[in-house]
Image: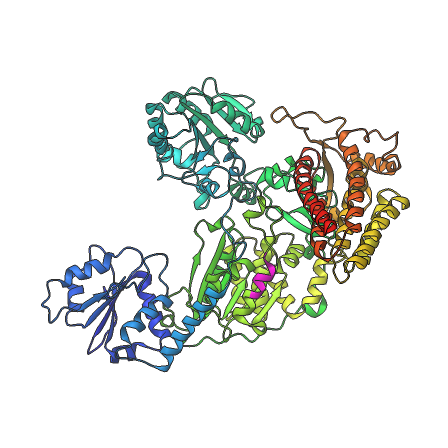
Amino acid sequence: DKVLIASPRPRLGIVASGLAAFAVLEALDSLGIDPELAANLGITVLKIGMPHPIDELSLRQFCDGLEEVLVVEEKRRIIELAVKDVLYVLPETRRPRVVGRCNEIGKEILSGVGQLGPDAVAIAIAGRIQSFHNSAKMQARLVFLEGKASERRARSALSVVRTPFFCSGCPHNTSTRVPDGSRAHGGVGCHFMATNMARDNVTHPQMGGEGATWIGMSSFVATDHVFQNLGDGTYFHSGLLALRACIAAGVNITYKILYNDAVAMTGGQPVDGTIDPAAITRQVHAEGVRRVAVVTDDLEKYKNPVGLAPGTEVHHRRALDTVQKAFRQHPGVSVIVYDQTCAAEKRRRRKRGTFPDPPRRVFINERVCEGCGDCSAKSNCLSVVPAETSFGRKRRIDQSSCNKDYSCRDGFCPSFVSVVGGNVRRVASSQEVPRHLQLLPEPERPNLSAKRSYNILVTGIGGTGVVTISAMITMAAHLEGQACQAIDQFGMAQKGGAVTSHIRLASETSVIKAVYLDAGAADLVLGCDALVAASDLALQSVSSDRSQLIINTHEAITGHFTRSPDLKYPREDLNQRLLGAAGARRLTFLDATAIATRLMGDGIATNMFMLGYAYQQGLVPVSSIGIERAIELNEIAVESNIETFRWGRRAAVDLKTVTAVAHGESSSSAQQPETLNELIDARANDLTLYQDVGYAARYRRLVERACQAEGALAGGFAGFGSAVARYGYKLMAYKDEYEVARLYSDGDFMKRVSQAFEGSFRLEVYLAPPLFARRDPYTGLPEKRAYGSWMLRVMKTLAQLRWLRGTAFDPFGYTSERRAERQRIIDYETIVDELSRELHHDNHALATEIASLPDGIRGYGHIKQQHLDEVDRVRADLLSHWRQDEKKAVAV
């Protein structure tokens, strides 16, 4: 035990241990009470070295004769109860009053839930000392804390929050699925996150108890069978015992033993012991399991099934649903070993050169993409990201985070291609640094004070290098002889969740007390992810009088997007939160991800780019030499990280030039037309290319009728005409074989591929031609196949034959799908004419809603039909409502 603050005339003793003791010191400092003033006021602080068993003699000597003891501790009241027990034997005249979790009347003053930071401790201490001490600084701090609390209460909740999710290409994206009508129980490991993904995975036991809960539950529920997820590490550690218990109990359960070849949740450590899928099959067979299967993403590994238990089935992962349906009918215990290496571990091993790295990347033709989200539904992958275009929301592959799982290609859509060979284009490797940015001036850096630390909060996404930035800053400070401390908050957030790093730098070690930043303490907020930077926890550290914020505007999706393809990123809400907390003068927005990815060929460069930008702005109190030396000592991608850091510095000097270097002649999707006339002209021009001038004229007449009716019958209102312009085009430009061929062969697609990749490469296109596609043996649906680059030449010829569309010579036009698409255009024209005739101010909103319904028609084949069925149902309801209202209007 150690007395941190001693007093000659002590009256209030504060007892704490570990981080809570440093929170006490930080809290006193924030209230304007330094150690000297505390001693004069009679405040003394004891830091407990060992909470249990506690040093009773030391504690009794410290507390003897005090008026009051305040115990500050997180979670369970171990120290508080020990203090009360130790002091119980003291005479009443020498026994102090003891408060901790609650005060003397039973009101809670320190929470037992979550982290106990300096702010909560400051409020508690102020409440105990106000009877004998008050000051302007203490009152100002309490007012500030109440103001921050009021701000937090006033803010509306964000529609999207960043929560942990499976990595891109994670085996659990597939392995934790269950057939309709079944459910699975969760367990210890990354796969536990499936319980939050609306895929019928529920509950979780202690480690090694996976399946044991079903023994007690099975006799009292109607469900006859469950699946039980069990990680390979947990299986070897103790999970086999629960499996044995299920065999002995005779319950109906299928264990899915998820063999991913690493203890992935805690950083990719190897599984203890010698274990492999074949050994698992033999072991469970020896325990009495008679129905065993191995499901894998690589059947080549099992061409020679030596070592598998007798009768073990081997299937590709595409057959998982079929296998599970069969196994759930099997009485007793059955086992499916799902064999696929952890995606994060694949990435690590590929960097070390110890795991195959296929020279193949997936790319999406955004014009062909319909934005249906089937690729996300099939893959559950965060590397399938939204792409906002002038034709609506499409999909794009984030090449930086993609772990080459390729399951997104299973989405029923002809927009997917494989780029075989070549590399992601890295602009910085081929561009010379502009002359005026070759020698960078050193910024005027903050001076570290002997009285106050300089505080940095870094916010970002797990797995993107947030902790690395913290390590580089603190190592640079250490190399330069500065005091530094940092604490990283991530836990399971390393799997795509919110990560924050709290960094304190000072000239002397004694200046730094609690590392966790208290309210308004941040001098710099490096917002590598805006969603985390705008969270309540991050904004608590922001002060409009002190903090400078640099925010990355990149809209990084969350796991919610895989289930909600139309999910909107809350950009405006984030901006308002940040502006409200810091003010416009202290806020800088920067699209760091777009620039860094183009320059360096990898989005992982974003955070280092942000650090360079902040450094050159004079917001980081360590030298560039120190930071670059820290990068060298880290020994990971040294040249790339140093170059990225320097590009960030250059961006701070001349952002316009650096942006131009990064993007060059590349162009994103076509710009959004700004006016209705521009929209109509753009869509008519596209329909001319789609079919001919006459077809475009038909479109113009449709839109003109709607706009004229809106102007004449609902003057002053807008929306109906633009809805017809957008969605009339969407129906008329339905993507048949000719249009898909045109969008591959018009030159724009190859231009985009060349902008994204460099080197020598070839393309493969994934198609399921309606006249030739085979049926998938597991699903019965048309099966996509890979076609070589020669298919692009075929497409060029097919696109030139688009004049056949809808004629008697159209070989594709006789299918029910194509006939329905042509009829749908006629139906839409009829409905628009009906809406236009009866339009008025009162029904304008309903007319616009009906005219916008084609927005919900997305996808190809059976996916499109699912959307059509839903749109038809809604359309029937809305038209019924429309016609009833018009009958009432006529009757009146």
Asked whether 210 or 260 is in front, the reply is: 210
Asked whether 686 or 856 is in front, the reply is: 856
Q: Left or right? Give the position of 167 relative to 88.
A: right
Q: Left or right? Give the position of 411 relative to 804.
A: left
Asked whether 731 or 387 is in front, the reply is: 731
Q: Position of residue 703 (x, y in %)?
A: 82, 51
Q: Position of residue 818 (x, y in %)?
A: 78, 33
Residue 528 is covered by the magenta coloring: no
Residue 575 is covered by the magenta coloring: yes
Q: What residue is shown at x 23% (from left), y 65% (from top)?
A: 105
Q: Position of residue 554 (x, y in %)?
A: 61, 57
Asked whether 526 or 121 is in front, the reply is: 121
Compared to residue 772, the image places residue 433 above or below, namely below
Q: Left or right? Give the position of 273 relative to 446.
A: left
Q: Left or right? Give the position of 90 relative to 726.
A: left
Q: Does residue 163 appear in the picture of this structure?
A: yes
Find the residue positioned furthest to the front: 892
The number of numbered discs placed on residues in the rendered structure image is 0
Q: Quadrant of residue 225?
A: top left
Q: What residue is shown at x 79% (from left), y 32% (from top)?
A: 819
For the N terminus, which image quadrant? Answer: bottom left
Residues drawn in magenta: 570-576
Q: Position of residue 414 (x, y in %)?
A: 72, 37
Q: Main secondary structure of the magenta part?
A: helix
Q: Does residue 398 appear in the picture of this structure?
A: no
Q: Quadrant of residue 550?
A: bottom right
Find the residue positioned furthest to the top: 310
